[in-house]
Amino acid sequence: MIESKRPEPVRAFNLGDRVRIKHYARGPAKVVELRGALGPGGEEVYRVRVGRRPYASHIELMESQLELVSPAGAARASARPKTEGATPAREAQPKIREDA
């Protein structure tokens, strides 16, 4: 039997990526599920979370309807700006047990 290997699909977005929905006025959304090549002509479909908890909505969009805002993990790194001359965290003092 001949084994045929299908090439892995090249995905533009990964789980956790922040994306902007084209022609949508609100803020960025977050990719929460990779649905696969379910769109017309095998286009990738993604489930994204729009809004914030407790009233977040999930919608499915094709790759052509999304633009990358920031990759997964980049938002956390840029959220904490490094300050010069910051003091290091204080080390915990060992507890001295006094038995009397």
Image (cartoon, rainbow, N blue to C red):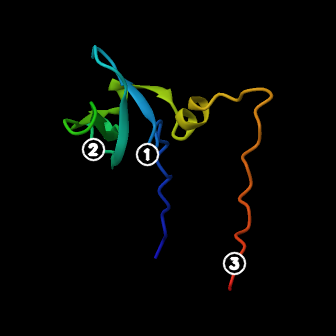
Residue that mark 1 sits on: 15
| CA distance for labels 2 and 3 | 64 Å
Q: Position of residue 68 (x, y in %)?
A: 47, 27
Which of the 4 image quarters holds residue 53?
Answer: top left
Of the 4 image quadrants, the one containing the C terminus is bottom right
Three-letter amino acid code at the position of disc 1: Leu
23 versus 49 height, above or below: above
> From the viewer's perspective, is the residue at label 2 or at label 3 nearer?
3
First in sequence, mark 2 or 1: give its number: 1
* Label 1 CA crowd tier, 10 Å (few <14, some 14–19, many 20+): some
First in sequence, mark 1 or 3: give its number: 1
Residue that mark 2 sits on: 38
Left or right of 91? Residue 65 is left
Q: Position of residue 44 (x, y in %)?
A: 35, 40
| CA distance for labels 1 and 3 | 49 Å
Q: How many marks?
A: 3
| CA distance for labels 2 and 1 | 17 Å
First in sequence, mark 2 or 3: give its number: 2
